[in-house]
Image (tube, rainbow, N blue to C red):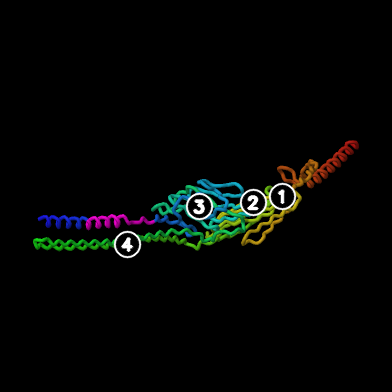
Amino acid sequence: MATQRTWVARTATAFALVMAAGGALIVEVGGASADPSKTPPPSGDVRATSVIGNETTCAGVGLPGDTQIGGDNSAGYNQDGWLVTNDGTFVNIVTIPSGVQIDATIVKGTDAYNVYPPTALTQLHAPIAGNSGGPATVSHWFICAGAAGSPSPSDSTSASVSPSSSTSTSVSPSSSTSTSVSPTDSTSVSPTESTSVSPTESTSVSPTESTSVLPTETERPLTDPAVTFSTACKTGITALLSNMNADNTTNTPVTFTVTGPDGTVQTVTVLADHIVKVKFPVKEDTTGVVSVQAPGLAKHTKSYVKNCTTVLGEKVTKPVTKPVVQGEKTTKLPFTGWPVATAVRDAGIALAAGLMLLLVAARRRRQS
């Protein structure tokens, strides 16, 4: 009886060891799991690369030697020769100081940011916000700039996040318990228990997300610089600088070099599909000359001779002579219409005849 109890005790102990090994195996296998890296949202722009995180320095994007413009800034920037506009959704780089080059532009929104290459200057925005299909509101942006001519990153700056997690757990505990009892009462119990557990779990997570937004046109710098001139006495010479095409294909600002009548040279940046008017006054009795040129536009020159003084003439007043009114010549008698000349002649004849009769009558009277 004691021998049977011993056998039962040993059997229970072996079973407990096997169950403990199995439990340890389950715990180990269950705990072996890997969380894949978070996938960045779509950039929404073929020029940009979307990166998860909240970067605020040039050193954080691999450009520690660059000068940072903008920083933690959700508004625009207008100083030191820079002019950057930001309407909350789109950032536009309008003016870049001479002797400076852009190495990268960062636009942050939602839980990621877009990295733009040096050639991207207009319509810069943050990654796509959730399922909205549109860019997220800009929380901040900054430019990493260096001296012109210094080595800069390739225009095809990209950030790639391809998390790959592979977890392989293999547990092969092997427990073999053999108990042999040979009691004197010729009772033989030879239980043999063999347990082999070889679970193998292999977890491989390789999420790859590829987002490609194809624009309607090839994204390459397109400009269409042009200039027209006009002159006026009041304004002098007016230069109308334009950067637009009839088919609305311009997408890059163009910088015009303008030389005024006094020899002063200035640069004027005109955004895509925009027009800028520049006026130059010209002094009286002088000749003003204005010249304009730009990349892709030959030098155009306009000269203007200003002679706008008006000489007033002398007013000459002639004396007024009153005309003499002469009487009308009467050729017929009123009412009868008898000609005056005939009436005068007949009246003279009648008077002469009357005088002759009077003389004859007077002579006869004396004779008698």
> Real-space Cα distance between discs 1 and 3?
53 Å
Q: Secondary structure at mark 1?
A: loop
Residue situated in front as seen by the camera: 261 or 8: 8
Of tags 4 and 1, which is closer to the observer?
4
Task: Report the residue marked by disc 1.
Answer: 282
Residue situated in front as seen by the camera: 240 or 292: 292
- Most distant residue in the right direction: 367
Q: Secondary structure at mark 3?
A: helix
Task: Report the residue marked by disc 2.
Answer: 278
- Mark 4 vs 3, N-terminal side: 3
Instruction: Answer left or right for 48 relative to 181.
Output: right
Start and end of the magenta stretch? Answer: 17-36
Which image quadrant: the C terminus?
Answer: top right
- Mark 2 vs 3, N-terminal side: 3
Q: Which residue does the image show at 53% across and 62% down from the upper left?
A: 220
> Real-space Cα distance between discs 4 and 1?
83 Å
> Real-space Cα distance between discs 2 and 3?
42 Å
Of tags 4 and 2, which is closer to the observer?
4
Q: Is residue 31 magenta?
A: yes
Q: Position of residue 37 (x, y in %)?
A: 39, 56
The residue under label 3 is which amino acid type? Gly
- Mark 4 vs 2, N-terminal side: 4
The residue under label 2 is which amino acid type? Val
Task: Report the residue marked by disc 4.
Answer: 202
